[in-house]
Amino acid sequence: MAAQNSTIPFAKMKIVGITGGIGSGKSKVMEFFAAKGYPCYSADAAGRRLLSEDQKVISTVIAAFGPAVVSPKMPLDRKKLAELVFKDKAQLQRLNAIIHPAVAEDFKAFLAQHKDAELVFKEAAILIESGSYTQCDVVLLVVSPKATRLARVQQRDAVSESAVLRRMQNQWEDEKKIPYADVVLENTDWPTTEAQLEQLLTQLTTT
């Protein structure tokens, strides 16, 4: 489980990490907290933004992966990059070694912008695998049956089952993540999930 975070720059702030496998519904969970007015940070969205806007990140990726990932319209062809890294774990690790430090710095800036917040939520697909869960006070793991997750992603992204399974293979199974989580939330029925999130929010704001 997450230890009390000693790296938070603002003493009264509590960071809640939200994670889960692809299709588990972790983004919808974060939207719940965002709708309540809490600062919410998506590490995955930040990574995509940095790949589009941060010249240092873009240059480093091109140097690492070559001209094949350069797009004539955008700095990087993220589709080609994704196809490359999700077929090769070594290539994925290479990309993560570029993106993760940049996202970590970006998150520090986000915290500084919300220094008066008592609760900040951070969503990351590989929060536990990357070790960044140690920077959170509470780790919330969102889980769903594999078949449900497959169906959600296929419908959302209009991709084949095999493509989703390849992406799943680059994430830990839920059973391996559970020992690192403070809260495990089964997300199969949203009204039930929402009720549990209301209870969790009460606990987070009163302890």
Image (tube, rainbow, N blue to C red):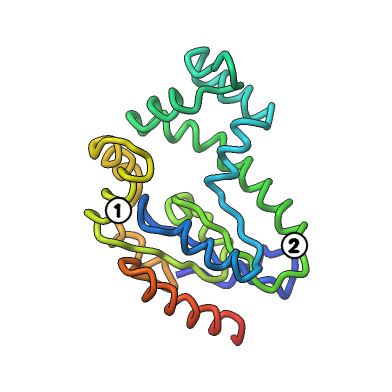
Mark 1 Cα within 10 Å, few/some/many (few <14, many 20+)? many
* Residue 4, percent from left and from top: 58, 72
Asked if residue 78 is positioned above or below residue 37 in the image, the reply reads above
Decide: few, some or many residues near mark 2? Use Cα within 10 Å; few <14, some 14-19, many ≥20.
Answer: some
Residue, far bottom: 206
Q: Quadrant location of the N terminus?
A: bottom left
Instruction: Decide if residue 71 is on the left or right side of residue 10.
Output: left
Closest to the observer, 71 or 138: 71
Where 102 falls versus 191 (above or below)? Answer: above
Question: What residue lies at 47% left-to-right and 60% top-to-bottom?
Answer: 28
Quadrant of the rendering where the C terminus is positioned: bottom right
Looking at the image, residue 26 sits to the left or right of residue 64; the answer is left
Q: Nearer the viewer, residue 157 or 69?
A: 157
Question: To which quarter of the image does residue 55 belong?
Answer: top right
Q: Position of residue 45 (x, y in %)?
A: 56, 45
Q: Where is mark 2, residue-wise?
A: 114
The residue nearer to you, when weighing 70 against 33, is 33
**Which SS class for mark 1?**
helix
Distance between the Cα atoms at labels 2 and 1?
33 Å
Where is residue 138 shown, x and y percent of the image? Answer: 52, 71
- Circle 1: residue type: Arg
Which one is earlier in the sequence, the residue at label 2 or at label 1?
2
Image label count? 2
Q: Nearer the viewer, mark 2 or mark 1?
A: 1
| 109 sits left or right of 84 in the view | right
What residue lies at 59% left-to-right and 21% top-to-bottom? 74
Give the residue type that dot 2 points to: His
In this picture, residue 179 sits left or right of residue 11: left
Question: Which numbered tag is attached to residue 149?
Answer: 1
Q: Secondary structure at mark 2?
A: loop
